[in-house]
Amino acid sequence: MKTPVFDALKNLMKENSVSFHMPGHKGKNTSFNWGDYIPMIDTTETFGMDNLLDPEGIILESQKETARIFGAKYTQYCPNGSTGSIYIALSAITKPGDTVIVQRNCHKSVYNSMILNRLDPIYVFPNYNEKYKVLTGVDPAEIERLLSENPQTKAVVITHPNYYGVVSNLPEIAKIVHAHGKVLMVDEAHGPHMGFSKNLPPSALSCGADIVIQSVHKTLPSLTSTSYIHVGTDRIDLNKLMDRFQLYITTSPSYLLTTSCEMAAAYMDTDEAKERLEKNIALCNKTIERLNNIDKVFCFTGDPEDKTIMAKDNTKMLFKIKNMKGTTLKKLLYKDFNIRLEMTDYYYALALSSLMNDEEDYDRLVDAANELSKRNIVEEIANVEVNLDEPNNVRPISDSYMGKKELVYLKDSVGRISATSIIPYPPGVPLIVPGEVITKELYEEIVFLQENEITIVGMMGEKDDQLVVVE
Ligand SMILES: Cc1ncc(COP(=O)(O)O)c(C=O)c1O
């Protein structure tokens, strides 16, 4: 049989590209060399081992060590990414029919979890910063208002930081949520490194969050699909959490991923890792300065006038070049300079760094941006709103997803109720979710994104021109 996947991976190894994308190990070993051990350490619950689904021995001991390093009361390793951890955490703090306040620009895993758990969402909208055309933070006053108006709410779910590295005033949000006697769950998929430096935004655990999800693989040297569920306070029922963990996780959890969760934490406990992280933060700040000094290049680092931004994690470098779409920038950086970025939206490109990037990577990025800025590329850039529309919600999310559906062409879908989520990916934030009416504006937005080569998940048919609606 042909082995197209392995062949492509072998080519990738030869390519020697600069990685400003996930995973956080950037294709390198730390002092721990995986190559010496694989496949020998890919084992199961045999003698001397432990069971991730009910840890009592070495895994429990390891998780306790990790909890200590991250400042949690309890940490659970999870081999199903933050996606799996979000399913588990949200089902552990709610029961079917409960109301939850969620950020409208939360990741699709939060929406999927609401479908699976039959939850009723109330949306809190992040600020849309018109000057820079980016979604920024959540105003704590909005959380106060929504909780006062909806006392039946069970929990509040906040993303911290967002894909661009922006964080809201989480300490204030935690105070408000707890004053109302509710639970604060934080999706910190993009921030497992933040608790290890005072030069980064504060970690969700240090802000008082009750339960925190982190993708270890996004910014720490860990294998893809590794995540942590950290419990920060006694508001979380650990028995229910483990019960839900067993509901969602494979009965053959990978020791490779379990060990990777451990080794990433162990590495972050070393002076070497902390020094590398500080060096990385300094290099990113320097790179941003160098990029901003290039004619036509702009790097977004925040906006003092935007009070919803408490801080910005600059290890995520969001930049653009005048008269060039984000998608073009990403493509040219790869094609002409062998630099792979994490994502783009219409305007910006995002270089996602980690403590495993080398100084040379940043020089290559700056040199490439410099050269690209000098090419006289002039694309027509439309003045589009990247803002999130107020959803036109007519049916419960879960019923619409689970009920009778039909496939229609996008051009015929206006006015119908969506039975699916339509999601530009990355960042994985849905434009519409099941139960919401497809508006003319949404139809136009999907067409616009497709024309501008932004990948959209949720479209069907060979030409991605159909979608699933409620019958
Ligand atoms: C904010 C956010 N939460 C959760 C996830 C899911 O993380 P994972 O890929 O580890 O399942 C993502 C993925 O990109 C994300 O951006």
Image (tube, helix red, strand yellow):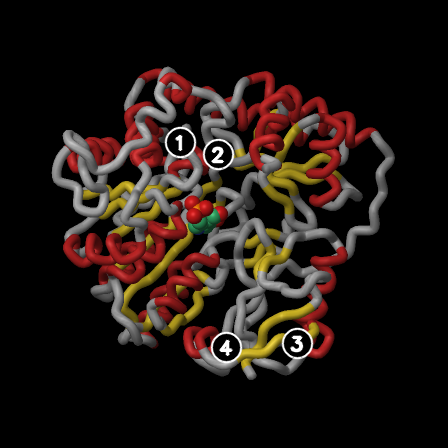
- Distance between the alpha carbons at the discs numbered 1 and 3: 42 Å
- Distance between the alpha carbons at the discs numbered 2 and 1: 7 Å
Badge 2: residue crowd in 10 Å (few <14, some 14–19, many ≥20): many
Q: What amino acid is at disc 2? A: Pro
Q: What amino acid is at disc 3? A: Val
Quadrant in the picture for the N terminus: top right
Instruction: Check the image and report above or below for 179 versus 70.
Output: below
Badge 4: residue crowd in 10 Å (few <14, some 14–19, many ≥20): many
Residue position marked by numbered label 2 in the rendering = 23
Q: Is residue 168 visible?
A: no
8 sits to left or right of 265: right
| Residue nearest the viewer, comparing 235 with 408 | 408
User: How many numbered circles does the render carry?
Assistant: 4
Q: Nearer the viewer, mark 3 or mark 4?
A: 3
Residue position marked by numbered label 1 in the rendering = 222
- Distance between the alpha carbons at the discs numbered 4 and 1: 37 Å
Asked if the residue at tag 1 contacts the one at tag 2, i.e. Cβ–Cβ closer than 8 Å, the answer is: yes
Is the shortest distance between ligand 1 and the CB of mark 2 under 8 Å? no
